[in-house]
Image: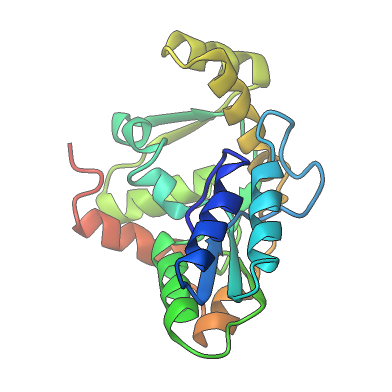
Amino acid sequence: VPLDTVPSRTPALVEQAVAGGVTRLVLLSARGADVPGYFGPAFDGGPHVEGERAVRASGVAWTILRPGWFAQNFSEGAFRDEVIAGELALFAGNGAASFVDAEDIAEVAVAALTGPGHEGRIYELSGPRALTVDDCLAEIGRATGHRARYVPLDEAAYRARLISQGVPEDSVATWVDALKPIRTSQEAPVLDGVVRALGRPPRDFADFARAEAAAGAWRV
C-alpha cells in the first residue's frame, strides 16, 4: 500500500485489496504519523493515521513502515538540483535527522511481504546516525569531490525563495511544515526498525553517497 496524502484513498484501496483475496498488507506510512504536532499543520499526518487505521482493521496480516526523511531527497528528490548547483538553501536551521536510505525501506517492505514474523508489527525506520544538512553535503562532497554549500534560511526568506521559483502557496506551506522534524531535530533519534526487520544495521549516509555518486546521481 503506497504513501497516499489523500485521506479517502488508502481505506478504499485496502477494502478492494482484501475483497480481491489479498492476505497480507504492508503500508508505507511516515515517521511521526502517530505524534500530534510532529509536522506543522500544512503537512497533515491525518492521511497516514487513516491509512494505518484501515490496515489494522483489515482482518488480514499487516505490517506498517514508518520511515523518516529519505536520503534520496539529496540524489533524486527535491534537493538534488541545488546540490548540483552548489548551494542548498532550506528552512532547516542546524537541526539533524537520521536520514534513511530508501533501499533499506524497500528491503524491509519485501521482507514484510514475503517472509514470516512481520505480522502485526510497526517498523520505525531511520539511518544509523543523525546528520545535519551540512553534514550530508559534506558526505556528498567526499563522495563526489563537489562540495555544495548549505544556506540556512529563516521562514520568510525560505517562503520567498520558493515563491520566486514558482512553487504554489499551498506547497510552500507544506514544505515549511515538512522540514519541521529536521529543523527541530525530532528526526535525529536513531530507530531500530531496520535491525528488527532485517537483522542488520541500516546503511550509513556515507555509503549511500558513494553509491549514488558512482551511479552518476550528481553528474551534470
Q: Is residue 59 above or below residue 1?
A: below
Q: Residue at x 52, y 88 (%)?
A: 199
> From the image, which quarter does the C terminus lie in?
top left
Near-viewer residue (99 or 1): 1
Quadrant hosting residue 41? top right
Residue 11, horizontal then vertical, whole percent = 61, 52
Residue 19, horizontal then vertical, whole percent = 51, 65
Q: Residue furthest bottom?
A: 116
Near-viewer residue (209 or 44): 44
Could you tell me if residue 99 is visible in this image? no
Q: Is residue 166 above or below residue 62?
A: above
- Say how the picture is coloured: rainbow
Quadrant hosting residue 34? bottom right
Q: Is residue 19 above or below residue 120?
A: above
Q: Residue at x 55, y 44 (%)?
A: 9
Residue 159, horizontal then vertical, whole percent = 58, 16
Could you tell me if residue 30 is visible in this image? yes
Q: Residue at x 28, y 56 (%)?
A: 212
Q: Residue furthest front?
A: 19
Residue 173, horizontal then vertical, whole percent = 63, 22
Say left or right for 215 vs 104.
left
Say left or right for 178 vs 100.
right
Count every numbered label the image shows and give the total.
Answer: 0
Near-viewer residue (167 or 96): 167
Near-viewer residue (176 or 157): 176
